[in-house]
Amino acid sequence: MRAPGFTTVAVITLALGIGATTAIFSVVHGVLMKPLPYRDPGRLANIWVDLGVGNQSLPAVSPGDFRDYQQRSQLFESFAAGTGAQVIGATGALGGGNETETERVDVTPVTANFLSLLGVDPMLGRHFLSEEEAIGGPQVVILSYDLWQRRYGADRSIVGRRIVLDGVGHTVVGVMPDAFNLLLPAEAFLVTDAQIWKPLRFDYSQAPPRNFTLFTVFGRLKPNVTFAQAQTEMDGIARQLRSEHALHESSDMRIRVIPLQHDIVKHAKPALWALLGAVGFVLLIACANVAHLLLARATARQHEMALRAALGARGVRLVRQLATESLLLALVGGVIGLGLAEGVLVVLRAMNPANLPRIAAISIDATVLAFTVGVTAVTAIVFGIVPALRAARQDLNRTLRVGSSLSPTTLQLKLRNVLVVAEVALALVLLIGAGLLMRSFVRLLQVKPGFEHERVLTFRVALPRAIRPTPEARRAFVDDLEHGLRGLAGVTSVGFTSQLPLTGSGALQPYAYDEETARNWESETSDRRNVSPDYFRAMGTRLLSGRVFDAHDSDARARIVIDETLAAKVWPGQPAVGKRLQLAPAGSPGNLYSEVIGVVEHMRILELTHDVRPQIWTPTLGVAGTFYTVVRTDGDPASLAPAVRTLMAEIDRNAAIDRLLPMSSYVADGLGQARLSLALMTAFGGVALVLAVVGIYGVISYSVSQRTREIGIRMALGARPRRVRNAIVIQGLRLIVPSLCLGAAAAWILSHFIGGLLFETEATDPLTFAATVALLLVVALAGCYLPARRATTVSPLVALKTD
């Protein structure tokens, strides 16, 4: 309290360091370290299937293989599967009958043991029964907690009530607990966290070929079984399946057993560890800064400490007193930092980055509090121990004799200089990391995704087959919808597709173009989408050659449109239009070959940062139960949303829509992880820069104050102010230059750890290194120049009178 300026600066510095570290640790703990919210989650596995080198590698299993896993495995307690609603013909249209409002909800069909395998029981009601999986069995559902709260007013009598789903009555048999969410790896495109769960009814006697991977499969290992043992067993089952099924033999099928927790967080792990390392640097800089402040304060208090020692205080007593002061500073800084950390988490939850899994698990819990206490204690020791030990070892006679004019020792000056060098070097490492991410983000913004996402409105339609059972009835609905949308003000084109870009993986289409690829079926695979004739125009995708579909293209095997990547791969240097591509294996019924009628530019339909697979576009066959609509406008697409909802209600109240969003929102989500990493790294770099410059300013300013008499004598003897300023700035450069060299070398080594976060940017990009070094040099020189300029404005008469 007697030194409020010192205390305020020290506490704020520590609060920034501890707060940032606590916030990032809470994210790392919640996402990477906290166990999954299931029973004994360490025994849960996700099953991946690899169909040949360089081809499909996904958590997707054929129904026949799933049955074989259940029958042949001895090391798994059980297997359970889920699939997409479209596999069983569900559209998710909830409402109709006695329910006046129809809405589109996410429906996930799962095996009866799915929820019990995870170890989660319904809050109300019961699990599915095995007989409810049978074809023609009773229509039953389990509701999510959110849907139960929102649509049914948390009515506890909901169990046993009938609701209308896809035009058919279903009995509610359970409600899931509030905390339950189905956590999945990003590649699990079939299954989603659902609002309604249904029994997975599948006729295994009519199972499709073994390369139709329709299920996402989870397994629970038996107690004391390791994942290595389980992998060995599944390798043996894979060998059996390859010997029994020609499709598996030709694709060299492999099965992988992946721990579920690892599978969920694997993409977020590199970024989070990099951010935790970066925030650790911020904490070190904060500690160095406060240690520098305490060293300066210890110099000013040497006479006080010597007097205490002369009056009988032992060295241990002095160390204890100064350590207590340091701990008090750290404690106050830690409390404020904890508040800052909670504020950061509030902002992070509001941002809800799409690529950050388990965001609901991020909180400041007992583990995070223990971490904060530990960091606070260690911080107090790091920045407080050296000044305390120096105070206990001082020369009493010299200190008491010299009194208040006592100057810092050479060792103290060297220690301060070392701290400043470390601060500047660490700040440079963080700034270079931020610069690399910024350069990467700029490159990402310049990516051409293959479509024009501005002024495009999209939505998903659920059209119950029970209401419109025939293709003609569904086609009539689509025609009415297209006609109505084209009549809305500002609409320029309307298209339909089976799946939008950047909404997950879709159907995979094997293809062959010569004898070898035909013989090794599935050695070549593409992404396939069904689209309407005007889809490419609505999306703003360029036609490079040929034509797109028209109303006469109704057979998906007759004519296709391909992307430029596939054209260049199969027919390099040749026109692709008019060529034929094989889209079905030998022996399949119907025509095996399709004619290429057009080539369009490649779309980045899975993610913005990578070109994954070539693309094949087929004409819409009738209408599926669920499809996406794309509406291009000449104005703000969001302004059309009310009119679209009204139009849907007029055409058919039993149809439901959801995801009524501008296409730009999907693109923004695709940039989410890059934007989050950039924002946090830039914030850390900015804090580090400020702290480093404050450290430089403090050292030079203190040095100038110690040399006030000397400078006064020089000025009185005729020294020019400019020359004095230059001498002081050069003194600062002797600290800055080694700092920059050390920091650049460390950044050169450490930058490779964030290489996986960069897009089209080298981890050792020389332009970024040079620009960042120049920026820090300029800012640091400013920190040196201000004390130098102030020193030369002091009157020589005043300077000569000091002490």
Image (spheres, grey):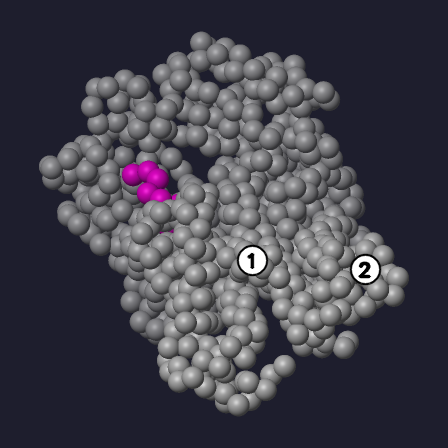
Q: Viewed as shown, does residue 568 lie left or right of 236?
A: left
Q: Whole-percent x and y of residue 650?
A: 47, 66
Q: Whole-percent x and y of residue 240?
A: 50, 10
Assess disc 1: are there few (<14), some (14-19) or many (≥20) residues with their C-alpha within 10 Å of its C-alpha.
few
As shown in the figure, which amino acid type bears the numbered disc 2?
Leu
Q: Residue at x 33, y 31 (%)?
A: 525
Q: In the rendered structure, are the residues bearing label 2 and label 1 in contact, judged by CB atoms less than 8 Å apart?
A: no
Residue furthest left as drawn: 574
The Cα–Cα distance between marks 2 and 1, rounded to whole angstroms, is 23 Å
Q: Residue at x 31, y 55 (%)?
A: 767
Mark 1, residue position: 414
Q: Nearer the viewer, residue 618 or 172?
A: 618
Q: Main secondary structure of the magenta part?
A: loop
Q: Whole-percent x and y of residue 363?
A: 69, 54
Q: Nearer the viewer, residue 173 or 361?
A: 361
**SS at mark 2?**
helix
Q: Residue at x 84, y 64 (%)?
A: 310
Mark 2, residue position: 318
As shown in the figure, which amino acid type bears the numbered disc 1?
Lys
Q: Any magenta on residue 184?
A: no
**Where is 361 relative to 703, above or below?**
above
| Magenta residues (range) | 606-614
